[in-house]
Image: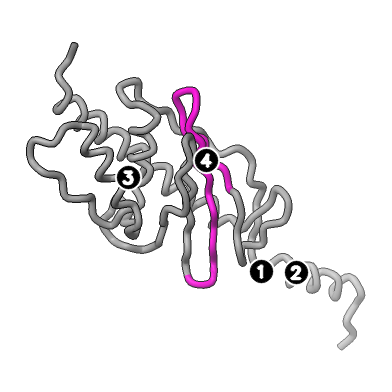
């Protein structure tokens, strides 16, 4: 049987593209912060989203004490909105208008910067390990992980609005 150069080239191309799938990073959709929440409330919501269990809050606590307790108990594992601990997000650093999160899954690592300004949270991928990140491209799973995190942050922001409205009397 004679192998033609075209068949050899086609097989080689198929093998080279069959591995990991990378995609363009692009702009990740910003998360709007509800008008009832401050930037510090948004930081606390991001931090609480990464916690396996919310911190214990004493009955009769005011809103500021709740936010302070979340910010001080920030080094816990992430549990998705479905209740199963399938991936691990953790807080790496908190700056005045930024929360830096890390994601570790086996040998894969992803770092995401959550910038808080102008009434929104802007997630950006800040670095990775073993996710084929080259310039503006990264393994497509990284974008799925960030998107799932953003959905959970939106849900936590909604819960914060309801909780704050129930604790803070209207003017």
Mark 3, residue position: 71
Q: Is residue 114 above or below residue 9?
A: above
Mark 4, other Cα within 10 Å: few <14 / some 14–19 / many ≥20: many
Of labels 4 and 2, earlier in sequence is 2
Q: Which residue is mark 2?
A: 16
Q: CA distance from mark 1 to mark 4?
A: 27 Å
Separation (CA) of disc 2 from disc 1: 7 Å
Q: For the residue labelled by badge 1, is the local secondary structure a helix, a strand or a loop? A: loop
Q: Which residue is mark 4?
A: 123
What residue range appears in magenta? 106-125
C-alpha gap between disc 4 and disc 2: 31 Å
Q: Is residue 94 magenta?
A: no
Q: Residue at x 25, y 36 (%)?
A: 159
Q: How is the image coloured?
A: one colour
Tell me the number on the disc at residue 19: 1
Q: Position of residue 101 (x, y in %)?
A: 47, 51
Which quadrant holds residue 109?
bottom right
If you read the primary sequence from the N terminus, does the residue marked by circle 3 or circle 2 appear first? 2
Image point 32% across, 35% down: which residue?
A: 157
């Amino acid at each position: 049987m004679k192998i033609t150069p075209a068949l050899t080239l086609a097989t080689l191309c198929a093998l080279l593209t069959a591995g990991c799938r990378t995609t363009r990073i692009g702009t990740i959709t910003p998360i709007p912060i509800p008008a009832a929440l401050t930037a510090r409330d948004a930081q606390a919501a991001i931090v609480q989203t990464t916690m396996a269990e919310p911190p214990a809050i004493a009955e009769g606590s005011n809103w500021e004490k709740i936010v302070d307790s979340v910010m001080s108990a920030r080094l816990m594992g992430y549990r998705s909105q479905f209740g199963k601990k399938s991936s691990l997000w953790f807080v790496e650093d908190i700056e005045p208008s930024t929360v830096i999160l890390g994601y570790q899954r086996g040998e894969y690592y992803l770092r995401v910067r959550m910038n808080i300004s102008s009434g929104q949270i802007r997630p950006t991928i800040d670095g990775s390990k073993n996710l084929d990140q080259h310039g503006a491209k990264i393994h497509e799973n990284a974008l799925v992980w960030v998107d799932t995190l953003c959905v959970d942050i939106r849900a936590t922001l909604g819960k914060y609005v309801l909780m704050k409205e129930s604790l803070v009397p209207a003017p």
